[in-house]
Image: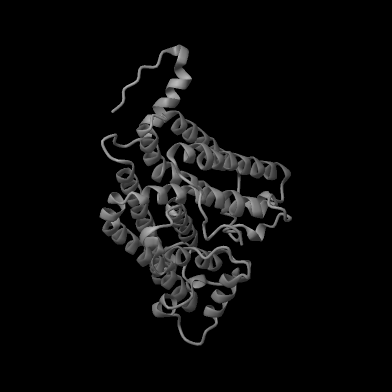
Amino acid sequence: MISLNCPRAVGIACLSLLSVSSQAADTSVTPRQQWYQDIGALYTRLAEATDQLQEDATALCSAPEANSESQLRSDWLSAYRAWQAVRFVDFGPIEVNSRAWQLQFWPDKKNLVGSRIKARLHQDTQVSQSDIDGAGVAEQGFPALEALLYDEGMADLTLSAEQPCALLQAISTHLNETSTALVTDWEAFGDYYQSTDSMTQATLHAAMQTLETIEDKRLGGPIGMMGSPANAYRAEAWRSDASISLIEASLQGLKEGFLPGLIASLDNIDRSDLAQAFDSQLDKTIKQAQELDGGIASGLEDADAQAGLTTLYMKVAQLRQLLNEQIASALGVVRGFNSSDGD
């Protein structure tokens, strides 16, 4: 444990350093050990959140008069945010059977989610678990549930009716089973991850790619910063207007699941100044996201909110530049080709 005394004359700078120091959970562990622990905790949180979602979906269908749809919507957002927090991890067990796509099919340029869910609701037989487990990824994840819960075309839908309930339970069960498998498989992945040097680069690249995706695709494209007009339908979770909440959850996930290991990595090369800078910029970016009322869809309809979205975009860009250039250079990380670059 690092102990610092902060004279008044240097109070602000010292408190900032204390903030960074407190993020490092255990100075006796290596960066990869720290990342392994923190990522595992995020996967566990996801499994717990989807378990609650599945439980309340079953409760709504079993006793609709005693359970509310609003609670289910709250569970959905909590679980979706839990996924966003660990979404930066793009290696290891998440790669098996395209699990990331199973959890979130996006971007969805052709509205496959909406069309597939409507087709399921009108199929002749009752939707079964095997129907969803064997379906395409557009029918299996959080966006599929969002279509059921928020799509304007389903405003007259009674969720507790037989077919919607069958679909609701099948999707929530699939989400929970996928999330639970990630917990188990991450535990099994531990020895390899912690003993393999290339996993350090993989983890750093994952965070770098996450910030690029947030800047360019999750924010820049929808708000019109990438050379095309603003278009709310290009945003995530446009039906529920939860796009900024999801971005904020991703940033919080970097703070909880990535930053402590990054601090350890930078401490090893005596560059705690870079850790402090990243932590400070990350906090500013999170704060900006939290101050926005609503998501991209509603924000594009209001001049003040649109200005706030632009400010968030710029703060993410600054955070990305800090990680991809200064920090990556200090750690000897070379930015390589990523299959998600470009369209």
Relative to 33, 269 lies left or right: right
Closer-to-camera residue (10/63): 10
**Of 184 and 249, which appears nearest the observer?**
184
Residue 130 figure quarter: bottom left
Quadrant for the N terminus in the image = top left
Rendered location of residue 9, percent (x, y): 47, 12
Q: Nearer the viewer, residue 276 or 138?
A: 276
Q: State the residue at coordinates (48%, 56%).
A: 77
Is residue 178 visible to the viewer in this orientation of the structure? yes
Q: Position of residue 58 (x, y in %)?
A: 39, 68
Question: In x, y percent, where is residue 268?
Answer: 35, 34
Q: Quadrant of residue 17?
A: top left
Residue 73 placement (x, y as % from top left):
49, 59
Please report the residue visible at 70 percent of the width from the left and 52 percent of the height from the top.
Answer: 224
Locate the C terminus and report the quarter of the image it occupies. bottom right
Q: Is residue 308 above or below residue 20?
A: below
